[in-house]
Image (tube, rainbow, N blue to C red):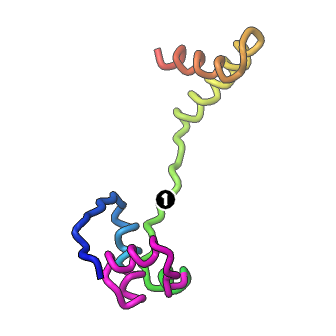
Amino acid sequence: MAKRDKTILIRVTDSERTVLKDRAAIAGKGVSAFLRDSGLGDKPPVQRDQVLAQSPAPAVKEPRVVGAGERSLAERRERRAKQLSTTMPLSNARQLATREIAE
């Protein structure tokens, strides 16, 4: 077997790292061996459902409630954008309306 003396660095998020570690553990391998086998064509013996069942659920953000003041600003912006859209594309009109209301 050839000597493994080369390194490849990759960047992953915390959740991606956790999934990779979990998949490697399920396969009975280290992360390096798991990634090497997966990347070089060996079929990983881990099914997605197995990992999802064992991985922690991702945090879910609560929907943001828009206040009355923000809603009225959005309504003012849309009204102004519709007025401006008679002379320019709506996307440009929205940008201009946003700038006008912010000032």
Q: Position of residue 16 (x, y in %)?
A: 40, 67
**Residue 48 falls left or right of residue 93:** left
* Location of residue 19 by image quarter: bottom left
Q: What stretch is highlighted in magenta?
A: 22-47
**Residue 102 falls left or right of residue 80:** left
Which residue is at the front of the view, 22 or 72?
Answer: 22
Q: Which residue lies furthest to the right in this view?
A: 86
Q: Position of residue 44 (x, y in %)?
A: 49, 82
Residue 72 highlighted magenta (yes or no): no
User: What element does badge 1 sit on?
Assistant: loop
Q: Is residue 49 above or below residue 11?
A: below
Q: Name the residue under label 1.
A: 62
Q: Position of residue 100 (x, y in %)?
A: 54, 14
Q: Is residue 48 above or below residue 97?
A: below
Q: Is residue 84 above or below residue 71?
A: above
Identity of the residue drawn at 51% across and 86% down: 50
Identity of the residue drawn at 47% across and 82% down: 51
Amino acid identity at mark 1:
Glu
Identity of the residue drawn at 66% across and 23% down: 91
Residue 45 highlighted magenta (yes or no): yes
Which residue is at the front of the view, 36 or 45?
Answer: 36
Identity of the residue drawn at 54% across and 84% down: 47
